[in-house]
Image (cartoon, rainbow, N blue to C red):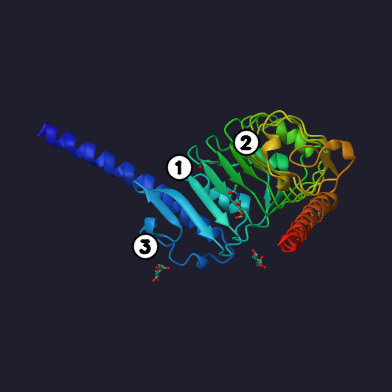
Amino acid sequence: MVTHALFCLLQYILLFCTLSAKAGDVDLLISFKNSLPYPNILSNWNRTNAMCEFQGITCKSGHVSSLTIRGLPLRADFMNSVSAYILPLMNLETLTLHSTNLTGSISGPVNCTVRLKELDISSNNLKGSVSNAASLADSCPSLQSLNLSDNFIGHAFYSFSPVLPHLKMLDLSYNKIRTNKDLEWLFSKVGLLKYLDLSNNNIQDSLGSLTNLQYLIMWQNNLNGEISGLSLSDLDLSNNRLSGPIPELGSLATFSAYAFENNSGLCGLPLPPCNGGSISKGDVLQQSSTNHESSQGWWITLVLLFTFFLIIGFVIGQFIK
Ligand SMILES: *[C@@H]1O[C@H](CO)[C@@H](O)[C@H](O)[C@H]1NC(C)=O
Ligand SMILES: *[C@@H]1O[C@H](CO)[C@@H](O)[C@H](O)[C@H]1NC(C)=O
Ligand SMILES: *[C@@H]1O[C@H](CO)[C@@H](O)[C@H](O)[C@H]1NC(C)=O
Ligand SMILES: *[C@@H]1O[C@H](CO)[C@@H](O)[C@H](O)[C@H]1NC(C)=O
Ligand SMILES: *[C@@H]1O[C@H](CO)[C@@H](O)[C@H](O)[C@H]1NC(C)=O
Protein backbone atom coordinates (compact mmCIF):
# COMPACT_ATOMS: atom_id res chain seq x y z
CA MET A 1 0.00 0.00 0.00
CA VAL A 2 2.75 2.40 1.04
CA THR A 3 4.81 1.34 -1.96
CA HIS A 4 1.86 1.93 -4.22
CA ALA A 5 1.29 5.40 -2.74
CA LEU A 6 4.96 6.24 -3.18
CA PHE A 7 4.86 4.93 -6.72
CA CYS A 8 1.81 7.07 -7.50
CA LEU A 9 3.51 10.11 -6.01
CA LEU A 10 6.63 9.46 -8.07
CA GLN A 11 4.56 8.99 -11.21
CA TYR A 12 2.66 12.18 -10.45
CA ILE A 13 5.92 14.13 -9.97
CA LEU A 14 7.38 12.75 -13.20
CA LEU A 15 4.21 13.51 -15.14
CA PHE A 16 4.06 16.99 -13.66
CA CYS A 17 7.71 17.66 -14.54
CA THR A 18 7.39 16.55 -18.17
CA LEU A 19 4.11 18.40 -18.58
CA SER A 20 5.46 21.63 -17.18
CA ALA A 21 8.63 21.37 -19.29
CA LYS A 22 6.55 20.80 -22.42
CA ALA A 23 4.22 23.61 -21.45
CA GLY A 24 7.26 25.87 -21.15
CA ASP A 25 8.26 25.18 -24.75
CA VAL A 26 4.78 25.56 -26.19
CA ASP A 27 4.17 28.77 -24.21
CA LEU A 28 7.32 30.29 -25.63
CA LEU A 29 6.38 29.25 -29.18
CA ILE A 30 2.86 30.65 -28.89
CA SER A 31 4.22 33.88 -27.38
CA PHE A 32 6.64 34.10 -30.31
CA LYS A 33 3.79 33.62 -32.76
CA ASN A 34 1.68 36.28 -31.02
CA SER A 35 4.58 38.75 -31.08
CA LEU A 36 4.64 38.70 -34.90
CA PRO A 37 2.91 41.49 -36.86
CA TYR A 38 0.94 38.81 -38.76
CA PRO A 39 0.74 35.81 -36.38
CA ASN A 40 -1.36 33.73 -38.79
CA ILE A 41 1.66 33.26 -41.02
CA LEU A 42 2.48 30.37 -38.63
CA SER A 43 -0.97 28.90 -39.20
CA ASN A 44 -0.54 25.51 -37.55
CA TRP A 45 1.20 26.89 -34.45
CA ASN A 46 -1.76 26.59 -32.08
CA ARG A 47 -2.59 24.67 -28.94
CA THR A 48 -4.97 22.28 -30.69
CA ASN A 49 -2.03 20.81 -32.60
CA ALA A 50 0.88 18.85 -31.17
CA MET A 51 3.81 21.20 -30.62
CA CYS A 52 6.26 18.84 -32.31
CA GLU A 53 4.12 19.06 -35.48
CA PHE A 54 4.35 22.87 -35.68
CA GLN A 55 5.84 24.11 -38.93
CA GLY A 56 9.64 24.16 -38.73
CA ILE A 57 9.86 22.45 -35.34
CA THR A 58 11.86 19.30 -34.65
CA CYS A 59 11.67 17.65 -31.23
CA LYS A 60 13.91 15.35 -29.25
CA SER A 61 12.23 13.53 -26.33
CA GLY A 62 9.28 15.91 -26.47
CA HIS A 63 11.35 19.10 -26.39
CA VAL A 64 12.05 21.54 -29.19
CA SER A 65 15.56 20.79 -30.42
CA SER A 66 15.50 22.72 -33.65
CA LEU A 67 13.55 25.39 -35.48
CA THR A 68 14.13 25.88 -39.21
CA ILE A 69 12.20 28.36 -41.31
CA ARG A 70 13.40 29.60 -44.68
CA GLY A 71 11.88 32.17 -46.99
CA LEU A 72 8.74 32.90 -44.95
CA PRO A 73 8.32 36.63 -44.17
CA LEU A 74 7.85 36.38 -40.39
CA ARG A 75 8.94 40.02 -39.96
CA ALA A 76 9.94 39.25 -36.36
CA ASP A 77 11.93 41.77 -34.38
CA PHE A 78 15.15 40.09 -33.36
CA MET A 79 15.40 41.23 -29.74
CA ASN A 80 11.68 41.47 -28.89
CA SER A 81 10.62 38.21 -30.54
CA VAL A 82 13.47 35.84 -31.41
CA SER A 83 15.66 36.66 -28.44
CA ALA A 84 12.71 36.86 -26.03
CA TYR A 85 10.88 33.65 -26.96
CA ILE A 86 12.97 31.35 -29.19
CA LEU A 87 16.53 31.58 -27.88
CA PRO A 88 15.45 30.64 -24.31
CA LEU A 89 13.93 27.30 -25.46
CA MET A 90 15.77 25.00 -23.06
CA ASN A 91 16.73 22.23 -25.47
CA LEU A 92 17.17 24.20 -28.65
CA GLU A 93 20.32 23.10 -30.51
CA THR A 94 19.93 24.70 -33.93
CA LEU A 95 17.99 27.75 -35.05
CA THR A 96 17.70 28.71 -38.73
CA LEU A 97 15.64 31.74 -39.68
CA HIS A 98 17.05 32.31 -43.16
CA SER A 99 15.43 34.97 -45.33
CA THR A 100 12.49 35.51 -42.98
CA ASN A 101 12.56 39.34 -42.98
CA LEU A 102 13.88 39.58 -39.43
CA THR A 103 14.16 43.22 -38.43
CA GLY A 104 15.62 45.37 -35.68
CA SER A 105 19.05 45.45 -34.18
CA ILE A 106 21.22 42.87 -32.56
CA SER A 107 21.95 44.87 -29.45
CA GLY A 108 24.22 42.98 -27.15
CA PRO A 109 23.68 39.91 -24.99
CA VAL A 110 20.63 37.70 -25.45
CA ASN A 111 18.79 35.23 -23.26
CA CYS A 112 20.25 32.16 -24.86
CA THR A 113 19.87 28.50 -24.02
CA VAL A 114 23.06 26.67 -23.08
CA ARG A 115 22.47 24.02 -25.78
CA LEU A 116 22.38 26.21 -28.86
CA LYS A 117 25.19 25.18 -31.22
CA GLU A 118 24.16 26.66 -34.58
CA LEU A 119 22.48 29.98 -35.27
CA ASP A 120 21.72 30.92 -38.88
CA ILE A 121 19.94 34.27 -39.25
CA SER A 122 21.34 35.00 -42.71
CA SER A 123 19.63 37.06 -45.42
CA ASN A 124 17.55 39.30 -43.20
CA ASN A 125 17.39 43.02 -42.40
CA LEU A 126 19.34 42.88 -39.15
CA LYS A 127 21.37 45.87 -38.05
CA GLY A 128 24.02 46.08 -35.38
CA SER A 129 27.72 46.28 -34.90
CA VAL A 130 30.43 43.66 -35.10
CA SER A 131 30.87 43.90 -31.34
CA ASN A 132 27.13 43.34 -30.80
CA ALA A 133 27.34 40.24 -32.98
CA ALA A 134 30.28 39.08 -30.87
CA SER A 135 28.32 39.81 -27.72
CA LEU A 136 25.37 37.78 -29.06
CA ALA A 137 27.74 34.88 -29.68
CA ASP A 138 29.20 35.27 -26.21
CA SER A 139 25.81 34.99 -24.51
CA CYS A 140 25.21 31.56 -26.10
CA PRO A 141 27.75 29.47 -24.19
CA SER A 142 27.78 26.50 -26.61
CA LEU A 143 27.47 28.37 -29.88
CA GLN A 144 29.88 27.00 -32.49
CA SER A 145 28.52 28.48 -35.67
CA LEU A 146 27.01 31.92 -36.31
CA ASN A 147 25.80 32.88 -39.77
CA LEU A 148 24.94 36.56 -40.12
CA SER A 149 25.63 36.69 -43.83
CA ASP A 150 23.65 39.16 -45.94
CA ASN A 151 22.46 41.59 -43.26
CA PHE A 152 23.42 45.16 -42.34
CA ILE A 153 26.09 44.54 -39.71
CA GLY A 154 28.34 47.58 -39.58
CA HIS A 155 30.92 49.21 -37.40
CA ALA A 156 32.31 47.88 -34.15
CA PHE A 157 32.07 49.73 -30.87
CA TYR A 158 35.23 48.10 -29.42
CA SER A 159 33.60 47.94 -26.01
CA PHE A 160 33.34 44.20 -25.74
CA SER A 161 36.01 42.44 -23.74
CA PRO A 162 35.46 38.65 -23.62
CA VAL A 163 37.04 36.41 -26.19
CA LEU A 164 34.91 33.77 -27.94
CA PRO A 165 36.79 30.54 -27.39
CA HIS A 166 33.90 28.27 -28.41
CA LEU A 167 33.05 29.86 -31.75
CA LYS A 168 34.38 27.86 -34.71
CA MET A 169 32.49 29.31 -37.68
CA LEU A 170 31.62 32.95 -38.27
CA ASP A 171 30.03 34.14 -41.50
CA LEU A 172 29.76 37.91 -41.77
CA SER A 173 29.89 38.05 -45.57
CA TYR A 174 27.67 40.50 -47.47
CA ASN A 175 27.41 43.03 -44.66
CA LYS A 176 28.47 46.66 -44.24
CA ILE A 177 31.69 46.33 -42.28
CA ARG A 178 33.84 49.28 -43.33
CA THR A 179 36.16 50.73 -40.78
CA ASN A 180 39.80 49.79 -40.71
CA LYS A 181 39.79 48.82 -37.04
CA ASP A 182 37.12 46.09 -37.20
CA LEU A 183 39.38 43.34 -38.39
CA GLU A 184 42.12 43.78 -35.82
CA TRP A 185 39.49 44.04 -33.10
CA LEU A 186 37.59 40.99 -34.29
CA PHE A 187 40.73 38.89 -34.66
CA SER A 188 41.65 39.61 -31.06
CA LYS A 189 38.32 38.10 -29.94
CA VAL A 190 38.11 34.86 -31.88
CA GLY A 191 41.03 32.82 -30.68
CA LEU A 192 39.95 29.39 -31.90
CA LEU A 193 37.91 30.30 -34.93
CA LYS A 194 38.43 27.85 -37.80
CA TYR A 195 36.23 29.32 -40.52
CA LEU A 196 35.84 33.02 -41.17
CA ASP A 197 33.97 34.54 -44.10
CA LEU A 198 34.19 38.31 -44.37
CA SER A 199 33.81 38.55 -48.15
CA ASN A 200 31.84 41.38 -49.72
CA ASN A 201 32.35 43.97 -47.04
CA ASN A 202 34.52 47.04 -47.32
CA ILE A 203 37.26 46.19 -44.87
CA GLN A 204 40.26 48.44 -45.38
CA ASP A 205 42.87 46.74 -43.32
CA SER A 206 45.89 44.53 -43.43
CA LEU A 207 45.71 40.88 -42.43
CA GLY A 208 47.06 40.08 -39.01
CA SER A 209 48.22 36.63 -38.10
CA LEU A 210 45.40 34.21 -37.32
CA THR A 211 47.21 31.05 -36.43
CA ASN A 212 44.19 28.81 -35.77
CA LEU A 213 42.19 29.64 -38.87
CA GLN A 214 41.73 26.93 -41.48
CA TYR A 215 39.33 28.69 -43.81
CA LEU A 216 39.58 32.38 -44.61
CA ILE A 217 37.33 33.91 -47.23
CA MET A 218 37.71 37.61 -47.75
CA TRP A 219 37.19 38.26 -51.44
CA GLN A 220 35.81 41.63 -52.52
CA ASN A 221 37.13 43.87 -49.76
CA ASN A 222 39.76 46.55 -49.58
CA LEU A 223 42.45 44.56 -47.79
CA ASN A 224 45.90 46.02 -48.16
CA GLY A 225 49.44 45.48 -46.97
CA GLU A 226 51.38 42.24 -47.00
CA ILE A 227 50.33 38.72 -46.01
CA SER A 228 52.01 37.12 -43.04
CA GLY A 229 52.44 33.37 -42.58
CA LEU A 230 48.93 31.96 -42.26
CA SER A 231 48.46 28.21 -42.25
CA LEU A 232 45.13 27.46 -43.88
CA SER A 233 43.21 24.69 -45.65
CA ASP A 234 41.19 27.09 -47.75
CA LEU A 235 41.64 30.69 -48.68
CA ASP A 236 40.11 33.32 -50.95
CA LEU A 237 41.72 36.74 -50.94
CA SER A 238 40.75 37.71 -54.48
CA ASN A 239 39.56 41.23 -55.37
CA ASN A 240 41.51 43.15 -52.74
CA ARG A 241 44.50 45.48 -52.79
CA LEU A 242 47.10 43.20 -51.19
CA SER A 243 50.72 43.56 -52.16
CA GLY A 244 54.13 42.01 -51.72
CA PRO A 245 55.36 38.44 -52.02
CA ILE A 246 53.12 35.53 -51.04
CA PRO A 247 54.96 33.77 -48.18
CA GLU A 248 56.65 30.57 -49.37
CA LEU A 249 56.59 29.01 -45.94
CA GLY A 250 53.35 27.52 -44.65
CA SER A 251 50.56 26.48 -46.95
CA LEU A 252 49.88 29.66 -48.91
CA ALA A 253 51.88 28.76 -52.02
CA THR A 254 49.81 25.60 -52.46
CA PHE A 255 46.58 27.51 -53.26
CA SER A 256 45.60 28.18 -56.84
CA ALA A 257 46.12 31.61 -58.34
CA TYR A 258 42.35 32.24 -58.04
CA ALA A 259 42.76 32.69 -54.28
CA PHE A 260 44.93 35.76 -54.96
CA GLU A 261 43.34 37.07 -58.16
CA ASN A 262 42.81 40.79 -58.72
CA ASN A 263 45.09 42.23 -56.08
CA SER A 264 47.17 45.24 -56.91
CA GLY A 265 50.62 43.98 -56.01
CA LEU A 266 50.87 40.33 -55.00
CA CYS A 267 53.58 38.14 -56.48
CA GLY A 268 55.40 34.85 -55.97
CA LEU A 269 53.99 31.32 -56.17
CA PRO A 270 51.28 30.55 -57.26
CA LEU A 271 51.47 33.91 -59.06
CA PRO A 272 54.40 34.90 -61.29
CA PRO A 273 57.69 35.71 -59.56
CA CYS A 274 58.21 39.03 -57.81
CA ASN A 275 61.13 40.54 -59.77
CA GLY A 276 58.78 41.76 -62.50
CA GLY A 277 57.41 44.51 -60.26
CA SER A 278 53.74 44.84 -59.45
CA ILE A 279 51.46 42.41 -61.20
CA SER A 280 47.75 42.80 -61.73
CA LYS A 281 45.20 40.28 -62.88
CA GLY A 282 45.43 41.71 -66.39
CA ASP A 283 49.18 41.18 -66.42
CA VAL A 284 48.80 37.61 -65.22
CA LEU A 285 46.26 36.84 -67.90
CA GLN A 286 48.35 38.54 -70.56
CA GLN A 287 51.45 36.71 -69.51
CA SER A 288 49.78 33.33 -69.67
CA SER A 289 48.27 34.14 -73.06
CA THR A 290 51.64 35.21 -74.50
CA ASN A 291 53.13 31.99 -73.14
CA HIS A 292 50.37 30.15 -74.90
CA GLU A 293 50.98 32.02 -78.15
CA SER A 294 54.74 31.45 -78.09
CA SER A 295 54.33 27.71 -77.50
CA GLN A 296 51.88 27.62 -80.41
CA GLY A 297 54.55 29.39 -82.51
CA TRP A 298 57.05 26.66 -81.63
CA TRP A 299 54.70 23.95 -82.78
CA ILE A 300 54.10 25.63 -86.13
CA THR A 301 57.87 26.01 -86.67
CA LEU A 302 58.45 22.33 -85.81
CA VAL A 303 55.71 21.13 -88.17
CA LEU A 304 57.04 23.36 -91.00
CA LEU A 305 60.60 22.09 -90.46
CA PHE A 306 59.41 18.49 -90.43
CA THR A 307 57.43 18.97 -93.66
CA PHE A 308 60.42 20.75 -95.24
CA PHE A 309 62.83 17.89 -94.43
CA LEU A 310 60.25 15.33 -95.57
CA ILE A 311 60.02 17.03 -98.98
CA ILE A 312 63.82 17.38 -99.24
CA GLY A 313 64.21 13.69 -98.33
CA PHE A 314 61.61 12.72 -100.93
CA VAL A 315 63.27 14.83 -103.64
CA ILE A 316 66.74 13.44 -102.81
CA GLY A 317 65.26 9.91 -102.81
CA GLN A 318 63.79 10.48 -106.30
CA PHE A 319 67.08 11.96 -107.50
CA ILE A 320 69.18 9.02 -106.26
CA LYS A 321 66.85 6.56 -108.07
C1 LIG B 1 -5.32 25.42 -35.30
O1 LIG B 1 -4.76 25.01 -36.55
C2 LIG B 1 -5.59 24.18 -37.32
C3 LIG B 1 -4.82 23.85 -38.60
O2 LIG B 1 -3.65 23.18 -38.30
C4 LIG B 1 -6.88 24.91 -37.65
O3 LIG B 1 -7.74 24.05 -38.36
C5 LIG B 1 -7.56 25.37 -36.37
O4 LIG B 1 -8.68 26.17 -36.66
C6 LIG B 1 -6.60 26.20 -35.53
N1 LIG B 1 -7.20 26.56 -34.28
C7 LIG B 1 -7.17 27.79 -33.81
C8 LIG B 1 -7.83 28.00 -32.48
O5 LIG B 1 -6.66 28.73 -34.40
C1 LIG C 1 11.20 40.47 -47.30
O1 LIG C 1 12.46 40.09 -47.81
C2 LIG C 1 12.50 39.96 -49.23
C3 LIG C 1 13.89 39.50 -49.58
O2 LIG C 1 14.42 38.62 -48.65
C4 LIG C 1 12.18 41.28 -49.86
O3 LIG C 1 12.13 41.11 -51.26
C5 LIG C 1 10.85 41.79 -49.34
O4 LIG C 1 10.62 43.07 -49.84
C6 LIG C 1 10.81 41.81 -47.84
N1 LIG C 1 9.52 42.20 -47.40
C7 LIG C 1 9.34 43.05 -46.40
C8 LIG C 1 7.94 43.35 -46.05
O5 LIG C 1 10.28 43.57 -45.81
C1 LIG D 1 15.79 35.97 -19.62
O1 LIG D 1 14.94 34.89 -19.26
C2 LIG D 1 14.51 34.93 -17.93
C3 LIG D 1 13.71 33.67 -17.65
O2 LIG D 1 12.94 33.27 -18.73
C4 LIG D 1 13.70 36.19 -17.69
O3 LIG D 1 13.29 36.28 -16.37
C5 LIG D 1 14.54 37.41 -18.04
O4 LIG D 1 13.77 38.58 -17.96
C6 LIG D 1 15.08 37.31 -19.45
N1 LIG D 1 15.99 38.39 -19.70
C7 LIG D 1 15.98 39.05 -20.88
C8 LIG D 1 17.02 40.11 -21.00
O5 LIG D 1 15.20 38.81 -21.77
C1 LIG E 1 25.60 31.39 -44.44
O1 LIG E 1 24.37 31.66 -45.06
C2 LIG E 1 24.48 31.95 -46.44
C3 LIG E 1 23.10 32.35 -46.92
O2 LIG E 1 22.19 31.35 -46.62
C4 LIG E 1 25.03 30.74 -47.16
O3 LIG E 1 25.17 31.01 -48.54
C5 LIG E 1 26.40 30.40 -46.58
O4 LIG E 1 26.90 29.23 -47.16
C6 LIG E 1 26.30 30.21 -45.07
N1 LIG E 1 27.65 30.09 -44.53
C7 LIG E 1 28.15 28.95 -44.06
C8 LIG E 1 29.56 29.00 -43.61
O5 LIG E 1 27.47 27.93 -43.99
C1 LIG F 1 38.88 43.79 -58.49
O1 LIG F 1 38.67 44.09 -57.12
C2 LIG F 1 37.95 45.29 -56.87
C3 LIG F 1 37.84 45.45 -55.37
O2 LIG F 1 39.12 45.53 -54.79
C4 LIG F 1 36.57 45.21 -57.49
O3 LIG F 1 35.90 46.44 -57.30
C5 LIG F 1 36.71 44.93 -58.97
O4 LIG F 1 35.42 44.75 -59.52
C6 LIG F 1 37.53 43.66 -59.18
N1 LIG F 1 37.74 43.44 -60.61
C7 LIG F 1 37.44 42.30 -61.20
C8 LIG F 1 37.76 42.23 -62.66
O5 LIG F 1 36.95 41.35 -60.61
Image position of 229 with respect to 134: above or below: above
Give the residue at mark 1. 90
Question: Nearer the viewer's eye, disc 1 or disc 2?
Answer: 2
Is residue 305 rendered to the left or right of residue 67? right
State the separation of the CA atoms marked 2 and 3. 45 Å
The residue lying toward the viewer, choosing from 236 and 193, is 236
Label 3 neighbour load within 10 Å: few <14, some 14-19, many 20+? few
Give the residue at mark 2. 214
Give the secondary structure at mark 3: loop
Label 2 neighbour load within 10 Å: few <14, some 14-19, many 20+? some
| Residue type indicated by callout 3 | Asn
Is residue 113 rendered to the left or right of residue 299? left
User: Which quadrant would residue 267 be assigned to in this image?
Assistant: top right
Residue labelled 3 has its Cβ within 8 Å of some atom of ligand 1:
yes
Q: Please say whether residue 109 is visible from this viewpoint.
A: no
Label 1 neighbour load within 10 Å: few <14, some 14-19, many 20+? some
Q: Of marks 1 and 2, which one's residue comes earlier in the chain?
A: 1
| Residue type indicated by callout 1 | Met
Question: Nearer the viewer's eye, disc 2 or disc 3?
Answer: 2
User: Which quadrant would residue 275 be assigned to in this image?
Assistant: top right
Q: Position of residue 237 (x, y in %)?
A: 74, 44
